[in-house]
Amino acid sequence: MIGGSWTHLLVRQLIRPLLGTPVKPNHLTTLRLVSGLAACACFSLGTPSGTGWGGAIWLISALLDRADGELARIGDMRSESGHRYDYVSDVLVNTVFFVAVGVGLRNSWLGAWSIPLGLLAGVALFLCMWWSELLERQSEPDTRAYGGKWGFDPDDALMLMAPFAWLGWLAPILVGAAAVAPFVAAATGVRLLRLKNASA
């Protein structure tokens, strides 16, 4: 949709009051990084309270993930270093999320499989994000590795982890991520390799 996803449009209105203040996009990125890792720490506890707090903090972190980019865009504060900081923070937080969930589910019905599944999903997501960034940088301007539909981006799915956590659905979500993410990573890697071969 024009102007970004529904989430971008919502966050854009929330951060407008920050224009003209000392708050910069990197400040929001730092809050996103700290809150995201804090949420992961909560999830890794594997307790009802940890899961509850983890979901709440994760939702805030996910909104901050949108907020830093929106502030940079509407405040004309975009920079290569800021994009790199945002990218590294996203990769770190999103990768650690699945590892933390796997650790937290060690006493669930997944048993000894939870941690390996968390590692598999985390590594696959890391490769997805790494290779998609390379793919977009080497493609035509405004090319997206993963396109959205109906006003939703693929990244918006990460926001759903909060309600999934509150509903007690993290175990099936982890199994699904571990099953699907490696194939998405492989497909992205193939696209990147084809692009490099075509350029060569």
Image (spheres, rainbow, N blue to C red):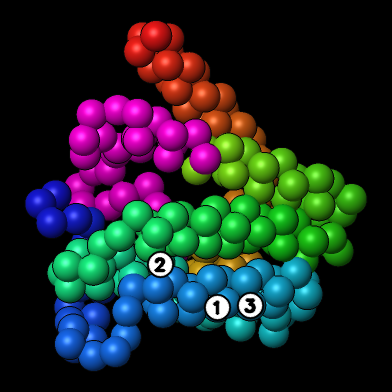
Say whether marks 2 and 1 touch (CB < 8 Å).
no
What secondary structure is found at the residue carrying circle 2? helix
Q: Nearer the viewer, residue 161 or 39?
A: 39
Give me the residue at 59% from left, 58% from top: 92
Across and down, in percent, residue 29 comes to 43, 71
Instruction: Reply above or below: 166 against 161.
Output: below
Circle on res. 65: 2
Amino acid type at circle 1 is Ser
Give me the residue at 42% from left, 16% from top: 196
The span from disc 3 to disc 1 (Cα, nearest Å) is 5 Å
Instruction: Reply above or below: 196 against 3.
Output: above
- The question of residue 155 being in magenta is answered with yes
Say which residue label 1 marks.
35
Left or right: 79 in relation to 96? left
Q: Split into 4 quadrants, where in the image is the C terminus?
A: top left
Q: Tell me, yes or no, if residue 161 can be seen here.
A: yes
Q: Tell me, yes or no, if residue 172 can be seen here.
A: no
Amino acid type at circle 3 is Ala
